[in-house]
Amino acid sequence: MKIKTDEITAVIKQEIEQFSSQLEISDVGQVVEVGDGIARVYGLSKSMAGELLEFESEGGTVTGQVMNLETDTVGVALFGDATRVREGDTVRGTGRLLEVPVGPELLGRVVDPLGNPLDGGPAISTKQRGKVDIVAPGISKRQPVKEPLQFGIKAVDSMIPVGRGQRELVIGDRKTGKTAVCLDCIINQKQYWGTEDAVVCIYVAVGQKDSTVAGVVETLRKAGALEYTIIVCAGASASAPMQYIAPYAGCAMGEYFMWQGKEGKTPKHVLCVYDDLSKQAVAYRELSLLLRRPPGREAYPGDVFYLHSRLLERATKLSKENGGGSLTALPIIETQEGDVSAYIPTNVISITDGQIYLQPELFAAGVRPAINVGISVSRVGGNAQIKAMKEVAGSLRLDLAAFRELEAFAQLGTELDAASQRQLDRGARMVELLKQGQYTPFDVIDQCIGIFCASKGFLDDVARDQVRRYEDELLEHFRGPQRALRDELVKSKSFKGLEDKFMAAMKAFKQAWRPDAAKKA
């Protein structure tokens, strides 16, 4: 059998092409030191800062991220089960940055920062992945914050309004209700789910006890809020690198939804709760000291401000050309003995657009939520309120501040004139009105009606312990006999032209109301 030369040449060419297509050139190194979630790797001369590495260990592949670039070695933070990595293991460079799974498949799930399920459910398979650490959208891609994000908490929505795309710090000592305030906000978004204003919520737990996170999951499940929430958990038992990347991973999962608006899809609004960033700073300090970076103030590394600023700067309200989506950030910071002037609290205060300060003294006095309106502030202000709320809550903050001063003066036993006594009585009723139970968010229209009632003096002669009952029954009255008037307010979102009608309705209700009446079922 005779074989032609050109046939042999074609076969050889085909073999060479197949060989070249299968040829893989990779940067390979070796672990020289490992421990405490940190590895030192020799031989990766082409590695980039932030690059994702793969460690080929006995139990399978472990991922890591390049943190330090040194003369002969690179310092790597290990993710996943770092105990599987041993000295001498082979390390391969990927040429990629750290990515996490993103998409609607994550809704209702509890995951670790790498997107692995922690709730015992099935494995999560998403079509897309998002970069964990990106540069925040520039000014040209943004627009001013002017859409309200309703917390459902009277004290917040009236005096410290938060807009979609804002960064509002929640700060206070431990056990003052910081997480409860944020969970109230998540639960309140249920009313918008399924509409154009729907908000996807992401709760990132950093350094929390697993039992605490389980309690949060159960609370959201009972409230029916889990279907639009992703819970990212790097608990107290998780390694420092996992706690460090958790807020960035949560933010990346949120950004997928934020950009949906550009494709004309919903939901495009996101709320990220970082609970809490003081624990993330501690994890980053541990990571930095293990990587032998020079310590600075309170042993934190010099770039601890950058750690939080590059995360919170990703909160934005996108321009109309980019779909008009938003990502709102609620970072939580724990203070020690109310010291808001410490290093990490002052850092985050200077990055955010305002803060909600929860005071232990108010909490102990039974004021829930224990918000100190003197230190709390929103730099967006009235832009993030509906007209009706602006009209009734304009002077509320000043009135409460004046009440606090007058209350301190009255404690000295000084006799007050009639005008001061009236101011004191009204302030005390207003404080009672602003109290509300945990996980019971109020509709914004109901809040407006309640504050309107108090500001017009209808509560001045109601006993303090009867204020809550009076408000409940007044709101029932406006959902029943006076429903048409309430619907007018819902439609116009302003008291303009309706003030006289509301005054007449409230006078009629006041005349019929009896303080000793049994509470309605």
Image: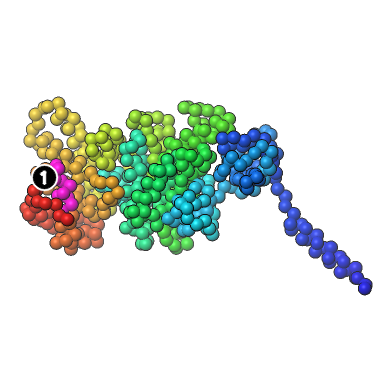
Residue drawn at 60 percent across, 45 percent down: 63
Q: Nearer the viewer, residue 90 or 421?
A: 90
Q: Identify the element where label 1 is drawn.
A: loop
Q: How many marks?
A: 1
Against 295, is 498 above or below? below
Disc 1: CA contacts within 10 A as few (<14), some (14-19) or many (>=20): some
Q: Nearer the viewer, residue 269 or 283?
A: 283
In the picture of the structure, the residue carrying the numbered disc 1 is 462
Magenta extent: 464-474
Rendering coords of residue 446 (x, y %): 22, 53
Residue drawn at 47 percent across, 36 percent down: 281
Color encoding of the figure = rainbow
Q: Where on the picture, by quarter, is residue 89?
A: top right
Q: Amino acid at mark 1?
A: Val
Residue 473 colored magenta? Answer: yes
Rendering coords of residue 164 (x, y %): 37, 51
Q: Nearer the viewer, residue 333 or 377?
A: 333
The C terminus: image quadrant? bottom left
| Residue 150 appearing in the image | yes
Residue 205 colored magenta? Answer: no
| Residue 331 appearing in the image | no
Rendering coords of residue 287 (x, y %): 54, 35
> Residue pushed farthest right?
2
Rendering coords of residue 15 (x, y %): 80, 62
Q: Where on the picture, by quarter, is residue 171?
A: top left
Residue drawn at 80 percent across, 60 percent down: 16
Residue drawn at 26 percent across, 44 percent down: 155
Q: In the picture provided, is 55 more to the left or to the right than 301?
A: right
Q: In the picture provided, is 349 more to the left or to the right than 118?
A: left
